[in-house]
């Protein structure tokens, strides 16, 4: 039962899960299918699928393979955040062949995109570095204020985009600013 007021026993604990992404390690889903709990936006011949190929995931037994083809591919989820809140996006990414990647962050309340330093009206991604080995890429996002959003909470689309070549992604996290 939840603790509201009073004393707690000495062996009590509080468990807080600040991670909002479902299936952050892309472990749920079948190889070749789009990742469970993630949406995939594709342009041209782009794909975003679960991979079980050695070297295309780092932890567990699966990862996400994004192929730009003749367009771009974005795997994303929509999360709820407080207006004005800061948070970080973190992912383990790897270049599988001339890969160009970026984080995709859009405030659905205002329609604006975070470009890494400001909210802008046009579609924008935050550039991240991808190399031939898995490396953590992390960027901080400062959500637009209550005054700009006109609401206490906002829906934010957060994902990773492959705009050229092929990129592998594993363990994507949303880290709340505390």
Image (cartoon, helix red, strand yellow):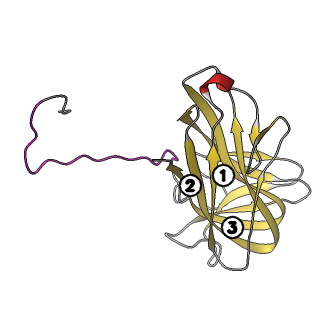
The residue depicted at 24 percent of the width and 46 percent of the height is: 14
Residue marked by disc 2: 29
Q: Are marks 2 and 1 in contact (CB under 8 Å)?
A: yes
Spot occupied by residue 57 in the image (x, y as percentages of width and height): 60, 71
Identify the residue position indicated by label 3 in the image: 168
Residue 126 shown in magenta:
no
* Nearer mark to the viewer, of 1 and 3: 3
Magenta region: which residues?
Answer: 6-22
* Circle 2 residues within 10 Å: few <14, some 14–19, many ≥20: some
User: Distance between the Cα atoms at labels 1 and 3?
Assistant: 13 Å
**Local SS, label 2:** loop
**In this orientation, which residue lies closer to the viewer: 131 or 34?**
131
What whole-number distance in Å separates the C-alpha atoms at marks 2 and 1?
7 Å
Residue 94 occupies quadrant: bottom right
Give the image location of residue 170, x and y in percent: 59, 64
- Report the residue at 79% width, 67% height from top: 166
* Circle 1: element type: loop
Instruction: Say if 108 sits above or below 40 in the image.
Output: above
Q: Which of 75 and 6 is in front in this view?
A: 6
Instruction: Determine the residue located farthest toward the right in the rendered image.
Output: 70
Of label 1 and label 3, which has the lower sequence position? 1
Q: Can residue 137 be seen in this view?
A: yes
Identify the residue at horizontal 51%, vertical 71% (top origin): 59
Q: Which mark is residue 11?
A: none
Q: Distance between the Cα atoms at labels 3 and 2?
A: 16 Å
Q: Main secondary structure of the magenta part?
A: loop
Could you classify mark 3 by the number of other residues whose Cα lies within 10 Å: few (under 14), some (14-19), or many (20 or more)?
Answer: many
Residue placed farthest to the top in the image? 150
Question: In the rendered structure, does residue 20 fall within the stretch colored magenta?
Answer: yes
User: Quick one: quadrant of the N terminus?
Assistant: top left
Q: Which image quadrant is residue 151 in?
A: top right
Mark 1, residue position: 34
């Amino acid at each position: 039962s939840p603790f509201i007021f009073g004393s707690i026993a000495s062996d009590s604990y509080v468990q807080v899960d600040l991670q909002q992404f479902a299936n952050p390690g892309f472990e749920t889903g079948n190889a070749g299918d789009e990742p469970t709990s993630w949406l995939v936006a594709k342009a041209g011949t782009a794909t975003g699928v679960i991979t079980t190929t050695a070297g295309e995931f780092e932890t567990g037994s699966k990862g996400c393979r994004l192929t730009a083809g003749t367009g771009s591919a974005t795997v994303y989820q929509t999360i709820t955040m407080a207006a004005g809140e800061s948070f970080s996006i973190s992912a383990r990414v790897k270049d599988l062949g001339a890969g160009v990647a970026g984080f995709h962050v859009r405030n659905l309340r205002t329609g604006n995109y975070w470009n890494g330093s400001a909210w802008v009206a046009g579609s924008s991604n935050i550039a991240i570095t991808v190399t031939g080995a898995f490396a953590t890429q992390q960027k901080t996002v400062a959500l637009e204020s209550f005054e700009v959003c006109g609401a206490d909470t906002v829906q934010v689309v957060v994902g990773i985009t492959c705009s050229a070549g092929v990129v592998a992604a594993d363990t994507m996290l949303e880290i709340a600013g505390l």
